[in-house]
Amino acid sequence: MRAVRLTVTAATTVAALTALSACTAKSDAKDGDAIQVTAADAKCDTSATSVPAGQVTLKIENKGSKATEVEILFPDDRIVSEKENIGPGTKYTLTAEVKAGSYEIACRPGMKGHGVRQKLDVTGSTAAAERDPRLDQAVARYRQYAQDQADATVPLAEVFAEAVKAGDLDAAKKAYAPSRLGWERTEPVAESFGDIDPKTDTRADGLEKGQKWTGWHRLEKALWADKKIGADEKALADQLVSDLKDWQKRVGKAEITPTSMANGAKELLDEVATGKVTGEEDRYSHTDLADFKGNVEGAQKAYELLKPVAAKNDAALAKELDRQFTALNTLLDTYRPDKNSYDFVSYDKVTKDQRKELSDAVNALAEPLSKLAAAVVK
C-alpha cells in the first residue's frame, strides 16, 4: 500500500523495456560518484543534475520532520526505483539502473502528493553493455512471475466481488484475503504505475484531499466494521475487479531491471514492517499475516532469481539472506495450523511480545536485503 500520487502513465512497448533491462551499462558506484540527496519537509537538494548512463546511486538523508519517500521517475511519472518510509534523521542508499534520457528525482515528505523534484539528465550510450546473462534471465522470469500473479489474482477478486454483490458477508470475508495474495507478492510492480495502487489498496488514513476511498480496504471496513453491504459496496466490488484487470494488462509494460527487483524485494519487507507487523494494513479483518506471507514470498522470489549472481559477487550476503528467509518463514509457519493454506491466526490474537518477535525477524532480514541491489551489479 502506498499513498496516492497524480500520475499520467504512458504506454511503452515491452520490447523497449526488455532492451533497457538487457543493455544497461555498469559503472562503479563509489561514494564519491553517488548523488547526495538531502530531503526535508519542503526541499529536495541533489548534488548532481547529470550522470552517465548505467548504475546510479543515491545517498539519501532525511533532514525533515516527516518520513519521506525518494523516487527516480521517468517524465511520465513511472517509477524507475524508489525508497519509501525514510524516517526523520535517517539515511538510505538506493542503487538503480538508468539509460540515457531525462528523469526526475522526487522527495515526497509525508509520502503524499507530487513532492519536491529535481531534474536529472542521464547521458551517454547504454548499448553493448557486458553483464552476466543470468541477470537478463532473472528479469524475464520475474516478469513472467509478476504476470502469473496478476492473472491468478483477477479470478480470485471476481469470487470476492460476486460474494459482495450477493450480499453474502461470510463468503465475502472468506474470499477477501485470498484475493490479495498475488497483489501482495508483486506490489512494487503495481506501485510502479502510480495510479493503480491508490484505487485498489489505500487505507482510510492514506487518502489525500478529495480522493474517493475505493478498493479492498474500503470493502474490508464494510464487511468487518460496518457489517453491511449496500449498493455502494456492490459498485465498489465491480470497480475493484475493473482496476485489477487494468493492472493485469499493464504488468507486461512494467519497468523491471535487476536492481528494481532487488529494491522491490526490500520494499516488500518495508511494507511488512510499516503495515503488517503494526496491524494497520488489515485493521478490520485482522488478516495481516496472510498479506505478510505474500510480501515475504514475493521478496524471496526476487532474491532467488537474482541469487546465482548475488552469490557469485557476495557469497556471505547470499548465505545470510538464505538464513534469514528461512528463519522468518519458519516463524510465520507457527501462526498457521495448515502449512499448505494461507489461513493464519487472526492478528488481533497475536500478543505484543509475539509482534515484537515478528518485527525483529523482519528487521533481521531487511538489513542484508538492503544490500542485494549493490551485490547484483558489482
Image: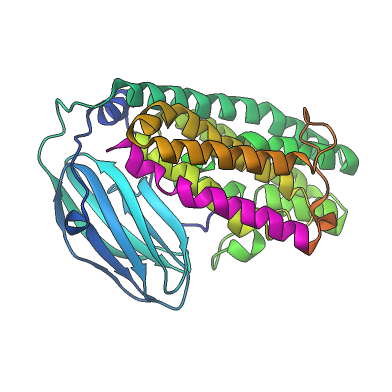
202 to the left or right of 192: right
From the top left corner, tell me how far across and down residue 136 is, in percent. Answer: 33, 24
Q: Quadrant of residue 171?
A: top right
Q: Is residue 271 magenta?
A: no
Compared to residue 214, the image places residue 254 above or below, namely above
From the top left corner, tell me how far across and down residue 317 is, in percent. Answer: 43, 41
Q: Quadrant of the C terminus?
A: top left
Q: Residue at x 57, y 49 (%)?
A: 199
307 to the left or right of 244: left
Q: Residue at x 22, y 57 (%)?
A: 31
Q: Please name the predominant secondary structure of the magenta segment in the image.
A: helix
Out of 377 and 178, give the one closest to the viewer: 377
Mark yes or no: residue 277 visible.
yes
Q: What range of the chain is rendered magenta?
A: 353-378
Q: Residue at x 33, y 44 (%)?
A: 374
Q: Is residue 367 magenta?
A: yes
Compared to residue 88, the image places residue 340 above or below, namely above
From the top left corner, tell me how far across and down residue 76 is, in percent. Answer: 32, 47
Image mark count: 0
